[in-house]
């Protein structure tokens, strides 16, 4: 089974506008591989033999919480797993997290840049703690984002702080723990209990960098992901299959680890 742990889509009525805005913000740095719709994602999944994709919404306004989560819940199927989203700048976070849980969504997606929060701020730690206590998985954008200036609001050191504060928990740092911060990932995160996804991966980090992190961290805590529609999942799969790893490790990264984490 191949599971893409990190994908983005939009309702058909919003997809064209959303894709235009997002590509414009980054000067078309990452040309999308699909149109940002559910049907576009499923078409690529069929083409590239991906069994399951996990939808990761980014909620940037409190008014979006109900509609965004209900929409994700409405498209869940045997091929689509849904995460939810909350607006972190509110004292009403428990209600929003309870909504995500009641809809049967598997986790929460956070983006420190788009949602404008520092990863290990004490106000965020209380949100993570409540969500983890409800059995949700937490997935975070990590590191560089071309739409925002440095310094970035997440880092491997900050993820290490979160892991210590949460005493573990099912937490995933995207982009192999920190886009363009991989030396620090190897130093501060590799070997901890955090999961790392491979989204926007082998186009940017070297095979040697990946193998260094994987050897120290353990293949059982690495999840294949593409960040679709911003990266070519087929190319990422080919890179993983070409790695000098055991077939069992490759199978675990491509889907086995996610299958266990998601309890599929």
Image (spheres, helix red, strand yellow):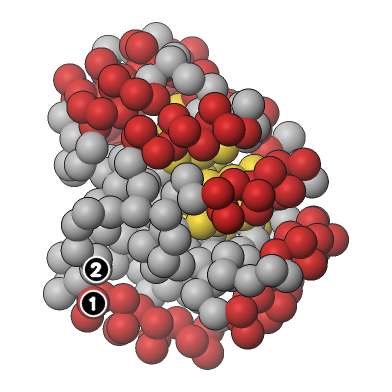
Looking at the image, can residue 232 be seen? no
Which residue is nearer to you in this view: 142 or 18?
Answer: 142
Question: Distance of mark 2 from mark 1, alpha carbons?
Answer: 6 Å
The quarter of the image holding the N terminus is top right
Looking at the image, can residue 207 be seen? yes
Picture quadrant of residue 213: top left
Picture quadrant of residue 103: bottom right
List x then y, in percent, for residue 61.
Answer: 54, 80
Q: Secondary structure at mark 2?
A: loop
The numbered disc on residue 147 is 2
The answer to which of marks 2 and 1 sits earlier in the sequence is 1
Residue sitting farthest toward the right: 102
Q: Are there few (<14), some (14-19), or many (20+) residues within 10 Å of tag 2?
A: some
In screen coordinates, is 9 left or right of 32?
A: right
List x then y, in percent, for residue 31.
Answer: 21, 67
Where does label 1 land, which residue?
25
- For the residues labelled 2 and 1, say whether their Cβ atoms are less than 8 Å apart: yes
The quarter of the image holding the C terminus is top right
What residue do we see at 15% from left, 74% from top?
27
């Amino acid at each position: 089974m191949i599971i893409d742990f990190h994908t983005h889509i939009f309702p058909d009525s919003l997809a064209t506008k959303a894709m235009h805005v997002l590509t414009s913000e980054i000067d078309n740095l990452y040309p999308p591989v699909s149109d940002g719709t559910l049907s576009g994602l499923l078409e690529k999944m069929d083409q590239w033999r991906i069994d399951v994709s996990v939808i990761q919404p980014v909620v940037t306004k409190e008014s979006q919480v109900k509609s965004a989560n209900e929409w994700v819940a409405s498209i869940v199927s045997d091929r689509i797993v849904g995460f939810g989203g909350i607006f972190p700048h509110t004292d009403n976070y428990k209600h929003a997290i309870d909504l995500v849980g009641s809809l049967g969504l598997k986790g929460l997606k956070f983006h420190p840049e788009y949602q404008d929060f520092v990863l290990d701020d004490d106000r965020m730690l209380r949100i993570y703690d409540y969500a983890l206590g409800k059995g949700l998985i937490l997935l975070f954008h990590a590191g560089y984002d071309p739409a925002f200036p440095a310094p970035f609001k997440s880092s491997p050191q900050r993820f290490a702080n979160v892991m210590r504060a949460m005493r573990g928990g099912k937490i995933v740092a995207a982009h192999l723990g920190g886009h363009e911060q991989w030396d620090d990932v190897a130093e501060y995160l590799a070997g901890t209990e955090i999961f790392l996804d491979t989204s926007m991966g082998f186009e940017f980090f070297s095979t040697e960098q990946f193998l260094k992190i994987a050897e120290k961290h353990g293949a059982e805590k690495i999840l294949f992901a593409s960040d679709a529609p911003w990266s070519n999942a087929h190319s990422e799969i080919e890179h993983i299959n070409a790695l000098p790893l055991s077939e069992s490790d490759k199978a675990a990264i491509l889907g086995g680890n996610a299958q266990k984490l998601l309890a599929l």
